[in-house]
Image (cartoon, rainbow, N blue to C red):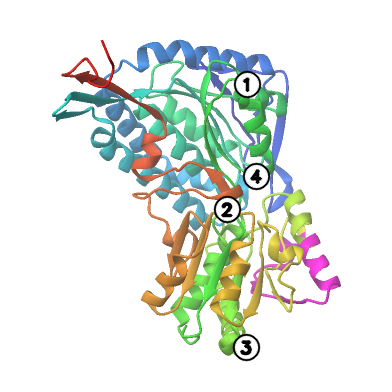
């Protein structure tokens, strides 16, 4: 079926903004096909979007919470109504299988609904009567929020910012990634229709736009999901005006398998394979390195290969049989292949996994066969760097002290997982340096939007999801009403 290329636009103060320049987004399954075009906004458009958001903030911050919730609920329903259309477009421009694109819409609306249901309780003013008087704690909106997000889960990583920002009375300027700009632009446009002009603005573009969004004095907060190196530039850009930051960054998430783990547990093995290769491994919280106790290592590898070959079916993401599509872009494909080549040159064994459904489709797109890496050294690139692609090293360890040290020496600390007898696994989990540690599962299968998500060390600052995700978009404002106005220890 042929599709006419889609053209998406920026949104500034409620209006679609035309631009002189556009860039194309190809279909990673068939790079000769252009899925659509997105604008290249100049820096002046970013300034105009921030100005519009700043002007809209004055009235939006005073809008009742009930009205904010009502508008958001209408937007949620419209996203659900157009879920089929959005997921198919996302699958075509991104390369993720259709089930994963549909799942992204599901998780996005689930979080938005949760935020609507929780925001009243979380940010309602608190009054405490005490012997010294009365203290009022209110939660004030921050102002303009710059929201910058990557291509791997563009709709969920935009709505994770939009919902709490708008519900708490802020306005937003969003910047999508050029590697998956189309479906998310449509989703943002759908949401923006339910809000006053200027409350939601969106610009596309290059580094000059990003610099403006992170340095402009009228921006109060930056919410960024993406790479650690980019985050360092953002922090420098934000430093002059001391902006509030939420940074959800990269990870090199470890999975530890304890000696009592049952290698014959087929469901657990399937969960691990999915935790390694969902979305082609292009997830910040995917399990990217696996440590297995030496006593079960060889049998574990055998059972893992069986499970991987059973679940992994590589093909066109719109094919219902497909569980893994192409890598999103050529640069990422080359990076992952480079890691594997480096591992092989250093003596590692690389084992291809899964079944290729259609060889001609596979050869035409940004496809690669997922790879298991054995016999790698603990400190090789394939182990210590974030692959963000379909390659996974499995390494043996001898005791808990060794494996905990190996896991914690990473500069990252986003998520992790421990697999084994539950109480034993919890004991080990307490010693891991990570924002989240999951027991007997990993990655998205252990994600719960009711609880905070974020990293430690170079995996980020702040939290999204849960009550903390809402509170990260407000300032607490303490109003103290003391009874005694004179301090007894200060002389007359």
Label disc, if present, on residue 284 of the rendered structure: 2
Residue in view at x 62 percent, y 26 percent: 239
Q: Are marks 4 and 1 in contact (CB under 8 Å)?
A: no
Between the C-alphas of marks 2 and 3, the distance is 28 Å
Tell me: 68 left or right of 17. Answer: left
Q: Secondary structure at mark 3?
A: helix
134 is higher (above) or lower (below) than 151: above
Which residue is situated farthest in the right direction here?
Answer: 345
Q: Are marks 3 and 1 in contact (CB under 8 Å)?
A: no
Q: Residues within 10 Å of mark 1 (few under 14, many from 20)?
A: few
* Residue corresponding to mark 1: 240
Residue in view at x 59 percent, y 29 percent: 8
Residue 121 quadrant: top left
Q: Residues within 10 Å of mark 4 (few under 14, many from 20)?
A: some
| Image spot of residue 375 (x, y percent) | 73, 79
Q: Which one is earlier in the sequence, the residue at label 4 or at label 1?
A: 4
Label disc, if present, on residue 298 of the rendered structure: 3
Label disc, if present, on residue 228 of the rendered structure: 4
Between the C-alphas of marks 3 and 4, the distance is 35 Å
Q: Which one is earlier in the sequence, the residue at label 4 or at label 2?
A: 4
Q: Which one is earlier in the sequence, the residue at label 1 or at label 2?
A: 1
Q: Are marks 2 and 3 in contact (CB under 8 Å)?
A: no
Q: Specify the segment rendered in magenta.
A: 338-363
Q: Residues within 10 Å of mark 2 (few under 14, many from 20)?
A: many
Residue in view at x 36 percent, y 40 percent: 112
Label disc, if present, on residue 104 of the rendered structure: none
375 is higher (above) or lower (below) than 369: below
Q: Nearer the viewer, mark 3 or mark 1?
A: 1
Residue 279 quadrant: bottom right
Q: Nearer the viewer, mark 1 or mark 2?
A: 1
Residue 89 is at least partly visible in this image: no
């Amino acid at each position: 079926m042929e599709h006419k290329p889609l053209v998406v636009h920026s949104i500034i103060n409620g209006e679609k903004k035309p631009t002189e320049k556009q860039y194309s987004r190809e279909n990673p399954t068939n790079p000769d096909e252009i899925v659509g075009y997105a604008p290249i906004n100049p820096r002046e458009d970013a300034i105009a979007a921030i100005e519009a958001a700043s002007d809209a903030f004055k009235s939006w911050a005073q809008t009742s919470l009930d009205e904010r919730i009502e508008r958001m609920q209408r937007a949620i329903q419209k996203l659900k109504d157009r879920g089929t259309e959005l997921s198919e477009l996302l699958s075509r421009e991104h390369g993720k299988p259709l089930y994963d694109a549909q799942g992204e819409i599901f998780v996005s609306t689930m979080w938005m609904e949760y935020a609507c249901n929780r925001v009243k309780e979380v940010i309602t003013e608190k009054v405490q009567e005490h012997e010294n008087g009365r203290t009022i704690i209110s939660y004030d909106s921050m102002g303009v929020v710059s929201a910058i997000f990557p291509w791997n889960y563009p709709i969920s990583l935009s709505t994770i910012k939009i919902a709490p920002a708008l519900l708490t009375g802020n306005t937003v300027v969003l910047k999508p990634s050029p590697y998956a700009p189309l479906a998310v632009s449509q989703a943002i446009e759908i949401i923006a229709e339910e809000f006053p002009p200027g409350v939601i603005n969106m610009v596309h573009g290059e580094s000059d736009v990003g610099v403006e969004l992170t340095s402009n004095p009228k921006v109060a907060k930056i919410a960024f999901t993406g790479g650690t190196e980019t985050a360092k530039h953002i922090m420098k850009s934000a430093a002059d005006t001391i902006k509030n930051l939420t940074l959800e960054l990269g990870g090199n998430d470890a999975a530890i398998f304890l000696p009592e783990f049952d290698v014959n547990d087929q469901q657990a093995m399937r969960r691990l394979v999915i935790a390694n290769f969902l979305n082609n491994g292009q997830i910040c919280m995917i399990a990217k390195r696996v440590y297995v106790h030496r006593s079960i290592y060889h049998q574990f590898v055998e059972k893992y290969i069986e499970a991987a070959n059973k679940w992994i079916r590589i093909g066109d993401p719109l094919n219902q049989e497909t569980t893994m599509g192409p890598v999103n872009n050529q640069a990422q494909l080359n990076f992952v292949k480079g890691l594997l080549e480096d591992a092989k040159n250093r003596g590692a064994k690389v084992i291809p996994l899964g079944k290729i459904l259609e060889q001609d489709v596979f050869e035409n797109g940004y496809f690669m066969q997922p790879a298991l890496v054995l016999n790698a050294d603990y400190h090789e690139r394939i182990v210590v760097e974030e692959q963000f692609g379909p390659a996974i090293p499995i390494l043996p360890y001898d005791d808990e002290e060794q494996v905990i040290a190996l896991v914690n020496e990473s500069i990252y600390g986003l998520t992790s997982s421990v697999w084994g007898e539950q109480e034993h696994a919890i004991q080990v989990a307490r010693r891991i340096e990570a924002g989240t540690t999951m027991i007997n599962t990993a990655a998205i299968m252990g994600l719960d939007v009711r609880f905070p998500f974020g990293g430690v060390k170079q995996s980020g600052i702040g939290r999204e999801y849960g009550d903390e995700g809402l509170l990260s978009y407000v300032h607490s404002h303490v109003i103290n009403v003391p009874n005694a106005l004179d301090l007894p220890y200060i002389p007359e």
